[in-house]
Image: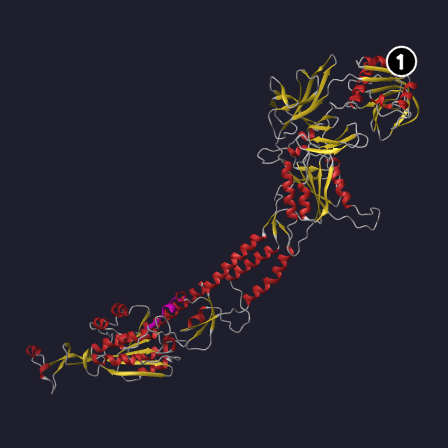
Amino acid sequence: MTWLDPFAGLLALAALLPPLVALYFLKLRRKDRTISSTLLWRTATADLRANTPFQRLRFSILLMLQLLVLALLAFALAQPEVSGGARAARHALLVDRSLSMQTKDAGADATRFAEAIEQAHERVAALHGGGFWFGQTPAIMVVSFASTAEVLTGFTDGRAQVDAAIGAIEPTDASTRLADAIALVRAALTPVNPDDPNAAAPDEIVIEVFSDGRIDDIASIALRPEERVLFHPIGKAATSNTAVAAVGVARDPKQPADVKTLARLSHFDTTSRTVDVELLVNGRVRSVLPEPIEIPAQSDDPLLGILPGEIEIAFPPLLLPDGGVIEVRIVESDALKDDDLGAVVAVPPQPLRILLVGGEGFIIRSALESLGPRELMEMTTEEFEAATRADPASLQSFDVIVLHGALPATAPTARYLVFGGGEGISGVEAYGEKSDAFAVGSRPDHPLMRFVSLDELFVHSHQAVAATERGEVIVDGSEGPLVLTITAPGTQVVLVTFDPLDSNWPFQRGFLNFVANSVQWLATFSRPVSDAPFKPGDVVSVMVGAAAIPVSILHPSGEEITVTSGSDGIASVGPLMRTGVWTVKWSGGDRRIAVASRDLMESRVNAVESLEFADETIAGRTSGGLSRSALWPWVLLAAVTLLIVEWWWYLRQV
Amino acid sequence: MSNDPTRPRKVDDLIDSRLMARLDTLDVVSRKIFLGKIQGERRSRRRGQSVEFADYRPYSHGDDLRFVDWNIYGRLDRLFLKLFLEEEDLSIAIAIDTSGSMDTGTPNKLDFARRLAMALGYIGLVNQSRVALFGFGANRTERLIGLRGRRRTREMGEWLLGLESGGDADFTSSMRSISLAGQGRGILIVLSDLLLAEGAEAGLRAVAGRGFDVFAIQLLSPEEVDPASGSLSGDLRLTDVERDAPIEVSITSRTLDEYKTRLNEYTAKLRDFCVQRGITHMVVRTDVPMDELVIDYLRRRGLLR
C-alpha cells in the first residue's frame, strides 16, 4: 500500500484526536429529565462528580464510532493506494518493444508488448495519482528500446504527454539492447557542464523497465548509485517457442533456374516438438515437407548455457527462373508468431560481368573463369585509368572489378577486389611492407570466409596497412591485416594486401573459394535485389537511379509510406523494424527486401523474473502489481457511512 | 391537577359500578383483634354479647341471667356465666402520600393511590368499618375521619379527588401525626412510593408501635421499576421532583443493571424491616389493573378476604 499524503493523515489525527478525546473527558451536554426520585440513581451510578470539570473516560460506543470515523478520515487524507513503491523525483519508463515482446503467452489476451504498454499507462496513472495537499508529480521520461533506443518524451510532468508518448511506441521484431536506453536516460540527467565540480549531484532516478527480461546486453550494464531500477516483468517463464532461425537459397550453377531452399528451425523447450513446415513463393504455398519435422528439445550446455534444439531442413529445388520471395513457415502457431516465418528474396539468375585490371598472371584469371561469368573483360592498368577518366559509367556496369595492383585515385564508385595494393584506397592507411607473415585470425562467419581455410597460408611479403573507421579486418596476419573490406558511399572494396603470387595461397583450395566468395559478395552490392535477408533495425539503401523521385515503401502488414530519393539516386529505407517482406517501388522498378530475425535470444521467449545487471540483480515486482488503485475514496465512503451509523446511534440514545 | 384526560376528575373515575359490585363481596382482614368503639362485625377481645363462645366465669350479682349456662348448673349445681366475643367495628385508616414524587409516573402514582384508596375505603364502608383517610404531603396532613356506611362513599371519593400533591413529604412526622390522631387502633394502609432519602423505617416504626396492623403498599411506576421502558436513555441530568440538586447520569446497560440492583436491595431491606415488625410490605406497579390488584393480589396477600 502506498501513502500519497501520509503527512495529511498524521496531521489530521494530531489535530482532531486530542480534541475529540478531550470532549469525552469533559462533561457531557446532558438532557434534563425530572423523575420521581433520584435516591436510587445516586447510589447506582458513579457519574456523580458534578463539580469536577473532567470525568473518567468510560467506554462509549459513540466515542469508539467517532474515533473510528476520525481514523478513517485520517486514513483517507493520507490517500492510500494499492500498491507500488515510493516515488522519486524522476522516473524513466523503459518499454521493451523487441521481437520477444510480441509473444502471446498462454492464457493472455494480448501480447507482452500490449501488456507492457498497459502497465506503463497504469504506472503513469499511479505516479500521477498525487494527493491534494502534499502530492508531488514526478517527472517522467519515456524510452522505448529494442536493437536501438528511442526517446519518446523527455522528463515531463505532463501526464497527457507521457501517455501519448507511451501510446506512440510501435512494436518491432528487433533484438533487445538496454544499454542504449540507459545511456539516453543518463544523458538526460547529465548537468549542462559535467566538468563543473560545483554542479549538483544528480537526483535519484527510478528506471522502470517493462520487459520480459530477455535482454542481450543486460550483463554489461553497471548501474550508478543514483539509479534505482524497478523491473516490471512481463510474460510467463514457462512459455516455449519454435522459430525459423534462418532461410537460405542457392542456385545450381549448372541449372541456374533451379532454386534450392534451406532452413534451420530452432526450438526452445525442454521437450521436443513436431511441426509441419511449408514453403511459399510469392505468397503461395509451393511445397510442403511430406513428413512432420521433429525438433529436438533444448540443451543445457555448462559453458554456453541454454542452447536451442535445432534441425536443418532442405526443400526440393524449385524452378524459379525469374526469382521471387521465398518464405518458410511453420504451420502450427505458437506463442511468438513473428519468428515462425523466414523469408528471403531470390533474384533472377544474372551471369556476372567482371573486369580484370592488370592481371598479368593466369592464376586470378583462371579463378575468375571458373565462376562462369557472362563476361570477363581484361584491361591494363593504363587502359583502366584512361577509362576512369573518359567513361566512368561504363565501368560501373561491371558487377566486380578485379585489380591486380593499386586502385587509381580516379576510380569510380564500384565493387572492387584488389590484390596487392592498399595505397590510394580511402579507408586504409598504407605504411610500408611486411614479410613472412601468416594468418593469426579471421572472421569465419563472414561471407568471404565461407569454406576458406588459412591454416597453411604463408605470405612472403605484403603491404602494411591500418584500417580506419571504414575498414574492417577480415583476416589478420602476424604482421598486420591481410584481408580487409572497405565500405564507402557507392563503393565496396575487398582488399588483399598481398600479391597471391607472393604467397602459397594459389596452391590451396581456399584461394578459389575466396575469390568466388569475394566476387559473389561484391556482386550482391550491384544487383537491384539482394538475396541476403536483412535483420530488423537495418537501414537499406536502394539504388533507384534518379534523384528526388518518390519511392513507395510497402510494409509487410500492407501499410504504405512514400519517401523521396536523395541527390545521389539512393533511397534510404528503414530502419526496417518488422520481419517479413518489404517492397520498395519507384518509377523505374521495384525491389523486395526480406527482413528476418537472426537473434535466437529473441526466440527464447520464456520470461525471466529478475534482471541480472553487471553488479546487481533486480528482482521483478511480483507483489502488489503495477496497478495502484486509489483507496481513499472508498475509505471516505466508509467514514461517511460510519458517521451516519454514529448519528443514528446517537439519536437512538437521546 | 393537570388537564390530562386520563386522570380522574369525578368519583366515578375513581371507582366504577362494576368494580363496586365486585368489591361488595370483599372485607378487610386484620391479623389483630382490636377494641372497637361500637358493635360491629368484628370479634373483639372484650367478651360480651356475641355468638362466638369465649369462656366461663362464676355468676355474680347483677349478671344477665340469659347468659347463665344451665347445663353446667345441672351437672355442677353452680352458676356459671357464658362469655362471648363481642363483635365490634374495625377502624381502617388509609394514608396517602401526596408528595411531589407521587404525582409522577405513567400511570400516575397518585391517581393510582386515589383509586386504590377508593376501593379499599369502599370495602371498609360496605362492611360497616370505620374508615379514616389521611393525605400527607409537604408540611401538612389532610384527613377525613369517621366515615362509616356505604352512603359515605361519594364523600370519600370527592375528598380523594381534592387531594393536592407537591412538596417534599416528611414521612416520619406524617406517620407520627396519624398514629396520634386517636382514631382508635385498627388497620393502617400506607400508600406511598416509600422512596425516601431518610428512609421509611422511622415512620413505619411509629405507626407499628401504636398497635396498628400496618400494610405498607409501595407504589412504583413502570419506569421506576425498569427505567429503560420509560425512554430514560442517553446522557441525562436527572432532577428529583422533590429536591433541587440534580444528578448526572449516563444511561447504559451497566447503569440500568446497577439501578435495578439498588432498587431490589432497597425494597428487600424495607421488606425485612417490615417483617421484623409485623408490617405487611407490598410492591405494586401502577400499571397493574385495579380489579386484578384488589380482587386477586390483595386477597392473596391477606389484606382482603
Is residue B201 among the parts visible in the rendering?
A: yes
Q: Is residue B251 above or below residue A312?
A: below
Q: In front here: A350 or A606?
A: A350
Left or right, A82 with reference to A218: left
Pick the residue in front: A50 or A268: A268
Numbered disc 1: secondary structure: loop
Observer-nearest of B148 and A164: A164
Residue type beneath disc 1: Gly
Q: Quadrant of residue B208?
A: bottom left
- Classify A354 as above or below B61: above
Magenta highlight on residue A333? no
Magenta residue check for B220: yes
Q: Is residue A243 visible?
A: no
Point out residue A296 in the picture as x, y percentages from the top left corner. Answer: 63, 22
Quarter residue A382 falls in = top right
**Residue extent of the magenta highlight:** B217-227
Q: Count the marks: how many? A: 1
A212 lies above or below B175? above
